[in-house]
Amino acid sequence: MSDLLERLRGRGWRLTAQRRVVAEVLNGDHVHYTADEVHALATSRLPEISRATVYNTLGELVSLGEVIEVSTDGRAKRYDPNAHHDHHHLVCSRCGTIRDVHPAGNPLSDLPEQERFGFAVTAVEVTYRGVCPSCASA
Amino acid sequence: MSDLLERLRGRGWRLTAQRRVVAEVLNGDHVHYTADEVHALATSRLPEISRATVYNTLGELVSLGEVIEVSTDGRAKRYDPNAHHDHHHLVCSRCGTIRDVHPAGNPLSDLPEQERFGFAVTAVEVTYRGVCPSCASA
DNA sequence: GTCTTGACTTAGACAAAGTCCAATGTAGGA
DNA sequence: TCCTACATTGGACTTTGTCTAAGTCAAGAC
Ligand SMILES: [Mn+2]
Ligand SMILES: [Mn+2]
Ligand SMILES: [Zn+2]
Ligand SMILES: [Zn+2]
């Protein structure tokens, strides 16, 4: 976490209270907040932070490769601090809970040459869907 | 195509000019239009069709399982008439072109039990990303 | 062929998610 | 401490999608 702030300072980031708070909110495992959720959490620590700054900061963190954008539902994008370990997502169809998962094998190698249409394929995103234990028992 | 209209009539669909035009637009291979694109194409055949009707009709086609929604970019949803053959998507990172692809193997079985967090996993979506031949040569 | 009626369509208001800008504030080097 | 380039802010604006009240019409009944 302060690793992150160190890395960012090393890259010439001017360290403001707003950026620090956004970086602090994006901490933990299985964290996938929308921009509005980040803004709400940031506001509870720094009441005057603006929506525009949250969007700006999230965009910068994505550009710097410190956070990844996840779109699992065609609604708001979610921001994921787990950018340094390749992973995919498991989403509950009822409540929307998202877990980080690590499938066996490399999904990229499952796409045969004749199915690549001449593309240079470089990345793959996998979204598993199902019902979480909590929703199943309710 | 007229198969589709037949099936829909059989399900009690009232067959209107608007619905017919939307169904006609959603025809072909590798078709993944946004609602606005469908509206523009429909308007060229039936100038007075409204945005609301396009959204309504697309939603109905999705509910009936005749069209699937695809979200590959966190922006507008895309509507895909290829609903009767399981497939995944290959997206050009530059121009956004989308191709239907069929990976080898079943991606669902690649998710180990201990990575399922107790979820009942029922579906998986895979999005491959890369650069298409046309963008690569430009 | 005409009538009837509930389903369908429409325009426009509204909402959610995100972008952009001009004015103001400030982190950090000199 | 001062300077200034960079950062923040509120609000206007855009894109994508939803909702509703009023008008229209497809298709079955006669
Ligand atoms: Mn994640
Ligand atoms: Mn498709
Ligand atoms: Zn759940
Ligand atoms: Zn391309």
Image (cartoon, coloured by chain):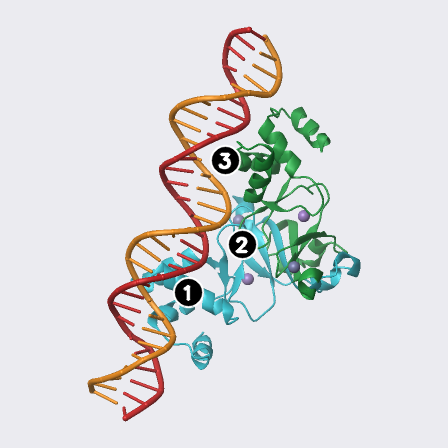
Chain colours: A green, B cyan, C orange, D red
Frontmost of labels 2 and 3 is 3
Q: Is residue B40 left or right of residue A32?
A: left
Q: Element type at marker 3?
A: helix
Q: Is residue C9 above or below residue D10?
A: below
Return the mark for residue A74.
2
Q: Residue at x 43, y 76 (%)?
A: B5
- Return the residue nearer the eye: B80 or A73: A73
How far apart are the two marked residues, 3 and 1, measured between alpha carbons?
Answer: 33 Å
Return the residue at label 3.
Answer: A52
Q: Residue at x 58, y 32 (%)?
A: A46
Where's residue C17, x and y in %? 51, 47
Frontmost of labels 3 and 1 is 3
Q: Residue at x 60, y 30 (%)?
A: A19
Can residue A132 be seen in this snapshot? Answer: no
Return the residue at label 1.
Answer: B56
How far apart are the two marked residues, 2 and 3, measured between alpha carbons?
Answer: 21 Å
Task: Work out which quarter of the rendered image holds the N terminus of chain A and state it.
Answer: top right
**Chain of the residue displaying label 2:** A
How far apart are the two marked residues, 1 and 2, measured between alpha carbons?
Answer: 17 Å
**Chain of the residue displaying label 1:** B
Under mark 3, the amino acid is Ala
State yes or no: Cβ of the residue under disc 3 lies below 8 Å from any atom of ligand 1. no
Crowd band around label 2 with a 10 angstrom C-alpha radius: few (<14), some (14–19), many (20+) = some
Q: Element type at marker 1?
A: helix
Same chain assignment for discs 3 and 1: no
Same chain assignment for discs 1 and 2: no
Crowd band around label 3 with a 10 angstrom C-alpha radius: few (<14), some (14–19), many (20+) = few
